[in-house]
Amino acid sequence: MDELTGENTLIRIFIGESDHHDGTPLYMAIVEMLRCEGIAGATVLRGIAGYGARSVLHTANVLRLSTDLPLIIEAVDTAEKVEMIIPKLDQIIGDGLITLEKVRVIRHSPRLM
């Protein structure tokens, strides 16, 4: 894996925890697709509260426990590689939001085992 430094692109994908694609949790389908496409790395973050385009509140509040908490998948790579995966994301994401922003990578290198 090449070291990734300097100006790159962060892709942030907002989906729901209960979303699926072909019987697989959507977040896992996305992470696996990103890995297969050679994206430098991805992280899935689980939110404790949020709402989307339909304004339905999803929360981890004990009195209103949701089984559909918000998830955010973040990945960073070159602008070219990120742009290349957007059509593939469009094919597997139904409801969701995708954002892009420029980021400056200070350090990215694989851990030596």
Image: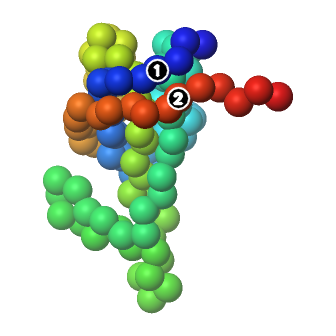
Which label is found at residue 108?
A: 2
Describe the element under mark 2 as helix, strand or loop: loop
Looking at the rendered image, the quarter that the N terminus falls into is top right
Q: Position of residue 92 (x, y in %)?
A: 38, 26
Q: Is residue 73 above or below residue 59?
A: above
Q: Which residue is mark 1?
A: 4
Q: Nearer the viewer, residue 65 or 12?
A: 12
The image quadrant that residue 7 belongs to is top left
Specify whether residue 87 is in view: no
Q: Position of residue 16 (x, y in %)?
A: 39, 51
The image quadrant that residue 12 belongs to is top left
Left or right relative to 43: residue 91:
left
Which badge, 1 or 2, is on the more N-terminal residue?
1
Q: How many marks?
A: 2
Q: Is residue 85 above or below residue 32?
A: above
Q: Residues within 10 Å of mark 2 (few under 14, many from 20)?
A: few
Q: Position of residue 6 (x, y in %)?
A: 35, 24
* Residue beneath the point at 43% across and 41% down: 73
Residue type highlighted by circle 2: His
* Residue beneath the point at 32% across and 32% down: 104
Quote the CA–CA distance across marks 1 and 2. 5 Å
Residue type highlighted by circle 1: Leu
Q: Nearer the viewer, residue 40 or 97?
A: 40
Proximity of marks 1 and 2: CB atoms separated by less than 8 Å = yes
Q: Position of residue 64 (x, y in %)?
A: 42, 82
